[in-house]
Amino acid sequence: MPLLPSDRLHELYRLHFEEARRERMFLSSTSFFAAFATARAITHAIRRGVGPFHNLSTGGHHLHHLVFGITGLLTTGYLWLLEVGTGAHGDDDALSRVTALLFGAAAALTLDEFALWLNLEDVYWAREGRESIDAVVLLGAVLSMGLWGGDFFRAVSAEMRRAEGVAPRAMEAAGASAGSR
């Protein structure tokens, strides 16, 4: 499938995320998914001794990634209390996007170690620390991305099919209804 030109992709993005709140929800869900997948990949690499990754320690104590997650959540919460990045006072859209991305990533880092704060011990690699959390969080992130970005993803898919010359009537109808919003 050919890639869409960046200007067309940007146009579709703007069309489907013209409401700032919906865009923040989508960006937060996307960064949640990306941060969760990245954290899992890095922790597996550390455990296997692959790549440049290693555990972080300070003062002889292992520094869990939930510390960065909690810090990010507190920072985002404080910024939102000050109404920075909320659009409440017509602030820059970039701040709104950055705080949404920060929130999603911070939530993922915190929830990835949910078993640690639930059990008050490091069970990350134990059975009770991994099975349900992996499935629920990953599935929740993908579903959330689809909920907030479903129309956008369908429009991009329709555009890619059109670019290939394969534009079934259903795809054309979906594109027409999206453009009429």
Image (cartoon, rainbow, N blue to C red):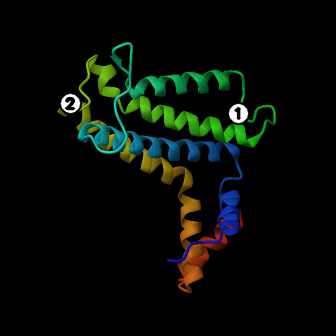
Q: Is residue 157 left or right of residue 22?
A: left
Tell me where residue 151 appears, x and y as whole percent.
57, 60
Residue at image location 53% in from the left, 70% down from the top:
157
Element at label 2: helix
Q: Which mark is residue 128?
A: 2
Quarter of the image holding residue 37?
top left
At label 2, which amino acid type do we have?
Answer: Glu
Residue at image location 25% in from the left, 36% down from the top:
130
45 w.r.t. 79: above or below: below
Query: Residue placed farthest to the top in the image?
Result: 59
At label 1, which amino acid type do we have?
Answer: Thr
Residue at image location 54% in from the left, 77% down from the top:
2
Tell me where residue 114 appears, x and y as whole percent.
34, 27
15 w.r.t. 50: above or below: below
Tell me where residue 134 appears, x and y as whole percent.
30, 41
120 w.r.t. 91: above or below: above
Q: Which mark is residue 174?
A: none
Q: Is residue 171 left or right of residue 45?
A: right
Query: Residue placed farthest to the left in the image?
Result: 127
Quarter of the image holding residue 123?
top left
Q: CA distance from mark 1 to mark 2?
A: 37 Å
Marks 1/2 in contact by CB < 8 Å: the verdict is no
Number of other residues with Cα within 10 Å of mark 1, as a class: few under 14, some 14 to 19, many 20 or more: many
Element at label 1: loop
Q: What residue does disc 1 label? A: 86
Quarter of the image holding residue 118?
top left
Number of other residues with Cα within 10 Å of mark 2, as a class: few under 14, some 14 to 19, many 20 or more: few
Query: Residue placed farthest to the bottom in the image?
Result: 165
Quadrant for the C terminus in the image: bottom right
Upstream in sequence: badge 1 or badge 2: 1
